[in-house]
Image (cartoon, rainbow, N blue to C red):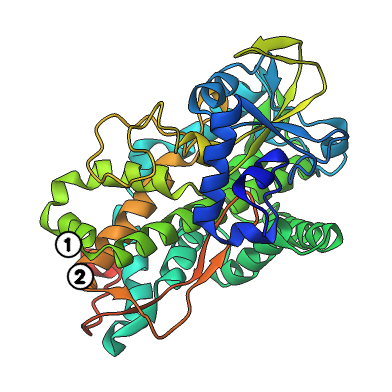
Amino acid sequence: MPTPEQHADNWDLRHEDFNDNDFLYAVYSVMRRRDSFAHTDTPFLTPTPGGAWVAVRYQDCYSILQDWQHFSSNPTPEAAEKLAGDLVITLDPPRQQMFRKVLNPYFSPARMKALTPQIRWETDRLIDDFIESGTGDLAQVAWRQPGVVFFKYVLGMPVDDVPLCIDLTDDALNGPTEDARMAAWGGLYQHIHDAVSARIDAPPRDDMIDVLLAAEIDGEKLAFNDVVSNAMLLVQAGLETTASAMSFAFHYLGTHPEERDRLIREPDIMPRAVEELIRFGGSIHGIPRTVAKETELNGHRFCPGESVIVNYASANRDDAEFPDADRCVLDRQANRHLGFGSGVHRCLGSNLARLEFRIGIEQVLARLPDYTIASDSETVFHGNSVTRGFRRLPVLFSPGPQVAVDPESAANV
């Protein structure tokens, strides 16, 4: 098995050794110590001749995310060929800001907060599936809760589509070959294409698909392919990243019962704990940027056309920004983590993601307060991709009763 030093020479996130997450972070530590920027011949999202530079230190990552004039979100020509439309995540201002202006109100703090009863109910329904038995799989809560909430209350797609879209998104990111990944992208695109097509002449529902269909940028409606592509982007973002982060939190608290008990005993620290668990879990390991104009950062000169990967997960474990960064400190005070990015492309759905994440933890701790990871069953960690998390997380706990009550029905009682 190659050493961390050997892996740091040419970082390949898809390498099988990185199914061991602790080992991956050991490699990141070497990369940060060596230089401001590492290199990879095999960038996993941007197929660029000559590979890509990798920003691994916090301050460099933050600077790049703030400087869209030099580090553009426009993909390299090779990556652009694989895009199915004009994506908000691949645009720069001013068009990007016009696009965000259309979408931002839908993800406002007030609008997302209004979903609190529904998110709590959906979480309780998932827990109800196994709570009476004293054993269950918390990965099912982590992966299904964000999907159900997003499809049912935000996107306006059938909840029955969630498992299929989870599988297609997972295969698109983690498939064993480029052909397998592209086939999954195609399958997901076709599924979203059909869902959006069915909505064109349907009565309005005030959901995100309606917002995209009605959106105008510079006085022009979005092309149909752009509507589909951005809906697909929202599906991927709404499923994979939050689910991965939540699965890490469940695993951490299940393997650190003193921390689990502290959160139950001191609920006032929950807001800080949420931010710390997002920082520590590191569900996003690379977002690409393309050098638009020659520039220098921290002694490194970048040339136009080069690809740069901003590694949020490594940045969030940088001791220069986070003292004792490899330790989860639930009440950490200063925590400007990059879990949701930074700058003009900061995560559009961060308000929803935080709410789903917090409610997921709150309901699990309230209803399974003594849960631990089952030692007689295998956990399954899904690595080797831009997002990484647990796909099977068997737990043991004291059985309890089912409690889920439809919030609309309860309101009418």
Q: Quadrant of the C terminus?
A: bottom left
Residue at x 86% of width, y 33% of height: 50
Can you tell which of label 1 and label 2 is closer to the viewer? 1
* Amino acid, disc 1: Asp
Image quadrant of residue 68?
top right
Residue occupying the point 37% across, 81% down: 375
Q: In the image, residue 5 lies at what x, y percent?
A: 63, 43
The structure residue drawn at horizontal position 19% and vertical position 61%, both measured from the top left corner, is 258
Image coordinates of residue 141 in percent, x first then y, are: 41, 69
Q: Earlier in the sequence, mark 1 or mark 2?
A: 1
Q: Which mark is residue 261?
A: 1
* Up-down relation of residue 275 to residue 254 (above or below): above
Looking at the picture, does residue 260 appear above or below residue 212? below
Q: Nearer the viewer, residue 161 or 136?
A: 136
**Which quadrant holds residue 190?**
bottom right
Q: Residue at x 67, y 55 (%)?
A: 199
**Amino acid at dot 2:** Pro
Looking at the picture, how far across and down is residue 249, in whole percent?
37, 57
Secondary element type, mark 2: loop
**Placement of 250 over or under 387, stated as above or below:** below
User: Is residue 400 shown left or right of residue 296?
Assistant: left
**149 or 224: nearer the viewer:** 149
Q: Which quadrant of the rendered structure holds the N terminus?
A: bottom right
- Residues at discs 1 and 2 in contact (Cβ within 8 Å): yes
Residue 78 placed where, x, y %?
87, 37
Distance from disc 1 to disc 2, alpha carbons, whole Å, reads: 8 Å
Question: In the rendered image, is residue 238 in sight?
Answer: no
Give neighbour class at mark 1: few <14, some 14-19, many 20+ (Cα, 10 Å): some
Query: Where does label 2 land, which residue?
Result: 369
Q: Left of 287 or right of it: where is 106? A: left
Q: Which label was assigned to residue 309?
A: none
* Quarter of the rendering containing residue 332: top left
